[in-house]
Image (cartoon, rainbow, N blue to C red):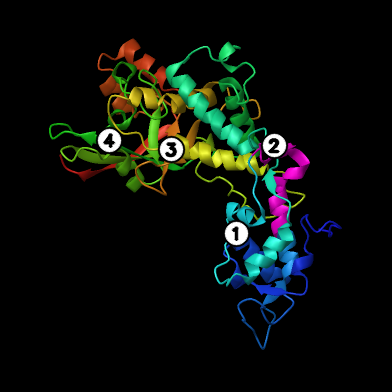
Amino acid sequence: MGDYDDSGFASTAPAEGYFVCADCFGDKHIKAFIEDAVSSAECDFCNRESETTNIAAPLDEVVELILEAVEREYRRAVEVLSYESAEGGYQGAHWDSRDMIETIGLDLPNDDGTLFEIIADCFGDEPWCDRDPYALREDKLLVFSWERFCEFIKYTRRYFFFQENEEFEDREYLAPAALLKFIGETVRSLGLVKMLQEGTLIYRARHFEASKALKSSYDFAPPPQERAIRSNRMSPAGIVMFYGSDDPKTAIAEIDDNPNLGIAVATFRTMREAKILDLTNLPRRFGFFERQSDSDERNRYHLAFLHSFVKSMAARVEPGDREHIDYVPTQVVTEWFRSVFLLDGAGIDGIFYPSTQNPGGCSVVLFADRYGVVLSASEIKEAAPDGGIDEWSLKNQHEKAWLQLVQSKVIREA
């Protein structure tokens, strides 16, 4: 960043001639920048020194990195805010240099005040304001749109919201249909739809009572439609899906809410490849001071929103009378991905999402009902005791089954 003739504006000049080490900053991206730019064996601020290697970088280069990050989010108030002397000055939120350093959370863990003052001098005397003080930043706009989506879907219009409607005319936030389309485009651009290989193991836990033993494929399959009377995170009552996890511990944690019931865990193997939207392994968000290479086309604000969105999708909902309302937004998103979203002209088979009950664990909803579970010949006969057309019909219903029960294990007796 070149210096400005007007000393009131931002300039690296006050930092020239000083050297600073990584220990003088708390942010990991500033630390990494310093470690890559060291050219002095002594730090001018914490008095660290080395007899064998360089440990400190030119402070003006570090300040350039900081100002570059600030100018990505903020501008000088004189450039964008109106000024009315009679009204107290700039009309809109603004910060002086020292307040700006506090606003961006610049951590100077070893500073006695000297480093802070030099950096503040580099920020100049002109106050700062949001880069666009009259509009929401892109990630905040998207988060606000999602919050509005949730309220709208729960309390205003649950169906036919793809139509144009007056609730969203001339509003700054995205309408529900536009937001869903945006989320789909974002996960597609980030490559979050992954191929689940044939032979992948999925674990599904079930409760059972003392008088009931779980053994067959149907015992661990999703329920029949007439028994799908409970709203779930990703599916409303009446819509059957296969819920599981990528490890037994998470599968157990997701259902273990009644100590009086037994628990059994079934291991299923996928019998074909499946396209899965993976919301458990998002690209990390960019740090405030992190530079983005010219070749990196990811939008840092879209990525920040996606992290917020997934956190909301996986948020714990307390069991009770409101489940059928509070699950509606995630159910609508899931239905959109199940019915509308396409990748290379084809739909997807499910969604991996962070476990609510086991932090760090991975849950999955597969777009498969009980007919997606493979039945053995003996299980078909048992499920269709009359034989004949009933048995043939059952075989036909399971023709495209792709989830095979491998084994089951009782974890806790009833």
Q: Earlier in the sequence, mark 3 or mark 1?
A: 1
> Residue, x 69% and y 58% (percent of image)?
66
* Type of amino acid under label 3: Ala
Return the disc, 2 or 3, that comes first in the chain's sequence: 2
Q: Quadrant of the N terminus?
A: bottom right
* Residue 118 against residue 43 in the figure, above or below: above
- Residue on which the image places disc 1: 106
Residue located beneath label 3 in the image: 314
The residue lying furthest to the front in this view is 86
Residue 250 locus on image (x, y percent) = 35, 45
| N-term mark: 4 or 2 | 2
* Residue range of the region highlighted in magenta in the rendering: 66-92
Q: What residue is at 53 percent from the left and 21 percent from the top? A: 339
Give the left or right position of residue 210, taking residue 215 as reference. Answer: left
Q: Which residue is mark 4?
A: 206
Q: CA distance from mark 3 to mark 4?
A: 21 Å
Whether residue 86 is in magenta: the answer is yes
Disc number placed over residue 86 in the picture, else none: 2
Measured as percent of width and height from the top left, residue 244 is found at 38, 37
* Disc 3 + disc 4, Cβ < 8 Å: no
Q: CA distance from mark 4 to mark 2?
A: 70 Å
Image position of 232 (left or right of 103): left
